[in-house]
Image (cartoon, rainbow, N blue to C red):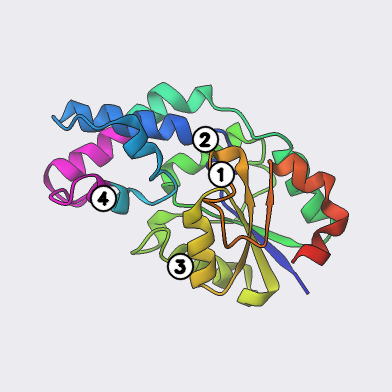
Amino acid sequence: MIKGILFDVDGTLVMSNDQHALAWQEAFAEYGYPIAYDDIRKLIGKGGDKLISEINPDLNEEEGDGRKIKNLRSEIFMKKYANTLHSTPGARQLVMAIQEAGLKTIVASSAKESELESLLIAGGVQDLLTESTTSDDVDNSKPDPDIVQVALGKIGHKADEVIMIGDTPYDIEAASNAGVKCIAVRCGGWTDDNLQGAVAIFKDPADILDHFDILGAKI
């Protein structure tokens, strides 16, 4: 029996993936690394530690230009893009329906803790999702399972008692590596081919809500 839901945020509850990619692109360029937008966009959903090293293996988020880029990216995102974000269709309504069904909920996001509140406000769920796990809580971000495993500990349920809802291949991989099934949504910009491994794929949270009564059969 499913007792809890782990929520990714970016791309799942908030339309923010494009803005994250733009902020990364601007930060890399500021330090002399011109990177194509598409090369960054396909990595959104991974933590900054992995994104930086995949873009340029010579960079490390903990030192030198890598650290500067990471910090500038966060500054650009918060100052330039955070106030432009809006929720994915049905985000708040889905969270409410899940909680009204008696399921526990928690955020399991690669976002930084300092950015999470703004993201939840943009998603209209800041008063509903009050428990969270972010990249600041773990050594390894998605697609490693650490964030999912810590969220499981906080929510107090076993892996087979929860479902994760996410929008990227990295959510699916992180959940799978922790023994958790994942429902995927397309509103983050990935295709069904990219989202293989999910137990079900929906357009967005509103689409999940429209099929809420049959989710039990799917999972």
Q: What is the C-alpha distance between the residues marked 4 and 2?
A: 27 Å
Q: What's the residue type where badge 2 is placed?
A: Ser
Q: Is residue 98 left or right of residue 12?
A: right
Decide which of tag 4 and tag 3 comes sooner along the chain: 4
Marks 2,3: beta carbons within 8 A? no
Q: What is the C-alpha distance between the residues marked 3 and 1?
A: 22 Å
Decide which of tag 1 and tag 4 comes sooner along the chain: 4
Q: Disc 2 on helix, strand or loop? A: helix
Along the line of sight, the residue nearer the viewer: 137 or 192: 192
* Residue with the mark numbered 3: 145
Q: What is the C-alpha distance between the residues marked 1 and 4?
A: 22 Å
Q: Nearer the viewer, mark 4 or mark 3?
A: 4
Q: Identify which residue is drawn at 38% across, 34% down.
A: 21
Q: What's the residue type where badge 3 is placed?
A: Pro
Q: What's the residue type where badge 4 is placed?
A: Glu
Q: Identify which residue is drawn at 51% across, 34% down.
A: 16
Q: What is the C-alpha distance between the residues marked 2 and 3?
A: 24 Å
**For the C terminus, which image quadrant?**
bottom right
* Residue with the mark numbered 4: 54
Q: Is residue 65 magenta?
A: yes
Decide which of tag 3 and tag 1 comes sooner along the chain: 3
Q: Is residue 65 above or below residue 216?
A: above
Q: Nearer the viewer, mark 3 or mark 1?
A: 1
Q: What's the residue type where badge 1 is placed?
A: Thr
* Residue with the mark numbered 1: 191
* Residue with the mark numbered 2: 118
Q: Identify which residue is drawn at 59% across, 70% down.
A: 180
Along the line of sight, the residue nearer the viewer: 113 or 13: 13
